Image (cartoon, rainbow, N blue to C red):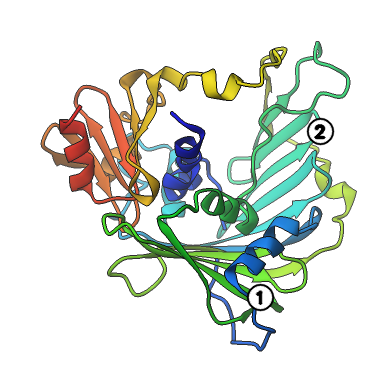
């Protein structure tokens, strides 16, 4: 799998991945504002030059993917599982705080509870007030004194989401600048990405870019044949000041159930300029096709454990020839009887054709 194809993997499954990871965040931009005109290349350069590294704010996510209703009270569905896929529908609010590169906090605001993810150097906590439970992740004691958590989670911010789409821009994408607007009280340019591939479910991706700093303030994904955005993530308020350091300290509340997990030691890297090109895809995972019409193909060995046995996911699947499928206005997933999984920003029929051709 080439680097160009591999970079599509995060963008292809964004709505599903956000839900399965219990992450959140979007609203439409506000009133039109007047800004000096800029070309698409100039707005792209603003994003590339942004120096915003510390910030805090409120995020709102809206997902209208046209998925079937999920019944969290069905037999076999635990309360924890019932909270995971809820982010695939409706609106959700979260607070996000980002300090230096080793400090971040996400607070997902539920109707009657709160979930917190806190990352601080060698430690990470996940706390759920609904059942007063906390999970503590630690770097192994044998690690280097300066070692921090490997693979620190990327918080669901417009900047993180925008970077995934922008990394995938190629000759198959038309990039233009739309009307400027106001987002979270800040004036913003709107960068529009429009796929040229008629076979993708995506009509366009719009990125609201702060006119002062180049920091992405919102991302809106429009599906074909759907009036409202299928998925959007944006700030409703934003501060570009460094958050209070105390926000990255966490002590489990009295009476909470605490589980501690020590992460495996990070392997010693072996210098190799061509390592990325030589490294095989995990378990044979590959990408079929190009650009917006790319299809991720996972062999049975690469499919996450429990994907097909999760009762809540099973509610969303429909029986099709040769397996089961999840279809939405943006993403299609095909789970074959032989254990393979195909997914992409394409209609189900294209996944079935790709499966039959292998």
**Where's residue 28, x and y in %?**
53, 74
Q: In which quarter of the image is residue 334?
A: top left
The secondary structure type at the circle numbered 1 is strand
237 relative to 4, above or below: below
Question: Residue at the spot x=64%, y=45% of the render?
Answer: 129
* Residue 136 horizontal/vertical position (percent): 70, 29
Residue 209 point in image, percent of width and height: 65, 68
Q: In which quarter of the image is the N terminus?
A: top left
Seen at 47% across and 18% down, the residue is 280
Q: Do the residues labelled 2 and 1 touch (CB within 8 Å)?
A: no
Q: Is residue 13 above or below residue 94?
A: above
Q: Which of 37 and 148 is in front in this view?
A: 37
Q: Please state which of residues 192 and 228 is positioned toward the viewer in this rendering.
A: 192
Q: How far separated are the C-alphas under marks 2 and 1?
A: 33 Å
Please state, as top left, top right, bottom left or bottom right, where the C terminus lies in the image.
top left
Label at residue 121 = 2
What residue is rendered at 50% in x and 49% in y? 168
* Label of residue 355 in the image: none
Name the residue that disc number 1 marks: 188
- In which image quadrant can residue 132 be found? top right
Along the line of sight, which residue is nearer the eye, 86 or 40? Answer: 40
Q: Residue at x 27, y 69 (%)?
A: 225
| 21 to 63, vertically: above or below | above
| Vertical relation: 268 (above or below) 66 | above
* Residue 97 in sight here: yes
């Amino acid at each position: 799998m080439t680097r160009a194809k591999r970079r599509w993997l995060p963008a292809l499954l964004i709505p599903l991945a956000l839900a399965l990871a219990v992450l959140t965040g979007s609203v439409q931009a506000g009133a039109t504002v007047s800004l000096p005109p800029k070309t698409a290349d100039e707005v792209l350069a603003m994003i590339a030059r942004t120096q915003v590294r510390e910030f805090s704010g409120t995020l709102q996510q809206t997902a209208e993917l046209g998925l079937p209703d999920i019944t969290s009270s069905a037999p076999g569905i635990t309360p924890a599982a019932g909270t995971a896929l809820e982010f695939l529908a409706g609106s959700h609010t979260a607070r996000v705080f980002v300090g230096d590169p080793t400090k971040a906090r996400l607070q997902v605001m539920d109707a009657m509870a709160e979930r917190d993810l806190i990352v601080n150097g060698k430690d990470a906590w996940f706390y759920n007030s609904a059942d007063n439970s906390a999970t503590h992740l630690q770097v192994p004691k044998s690690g280097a004194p300066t070692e921090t958590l490997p693979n620190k989670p990327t918080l669901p911010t417009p900047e993180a989401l925008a970077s995934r789409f922008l990394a995938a821009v190629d000759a198959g994408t038309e990039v233009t600048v739309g009307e400027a607007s106001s987002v979270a009280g800040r004036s913003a340019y709107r960068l529009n990405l429009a796929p040229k591939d008629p076979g993708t479910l995506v009509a366009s991706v719009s990125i609201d870019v702060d006119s002062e700093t180049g920091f992405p303030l919102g991302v809106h994904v429009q599906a074909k044949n759907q009036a409202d955005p299928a998925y959007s993530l944006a700030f409703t308020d934003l501060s570009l000041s460094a958050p209070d350091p105390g926000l990255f300290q966490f002590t489990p509340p009295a009476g909470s159930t605490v589980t501690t997990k020590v992460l495996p030691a990070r392997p010693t890297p072996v210098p190799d300029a061509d390592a990325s090109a030589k490294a095989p895809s995990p378990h044979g995972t590959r990408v079929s096709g190009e650009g917006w019409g790319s299809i991720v193909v996972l062999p049975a060995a690469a499919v996450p454990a429990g994907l097909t046995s999760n009762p809540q996911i099973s509610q969303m699947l429909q029986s099709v020839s040769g397996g089961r499928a999840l279809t939405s206005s943006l993403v299609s997933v095909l789970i074959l009887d032989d254990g393979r999984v195909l997914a992409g920003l394409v209609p189900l029929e294209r996944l079935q054709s790709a499966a039959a051709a292998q």
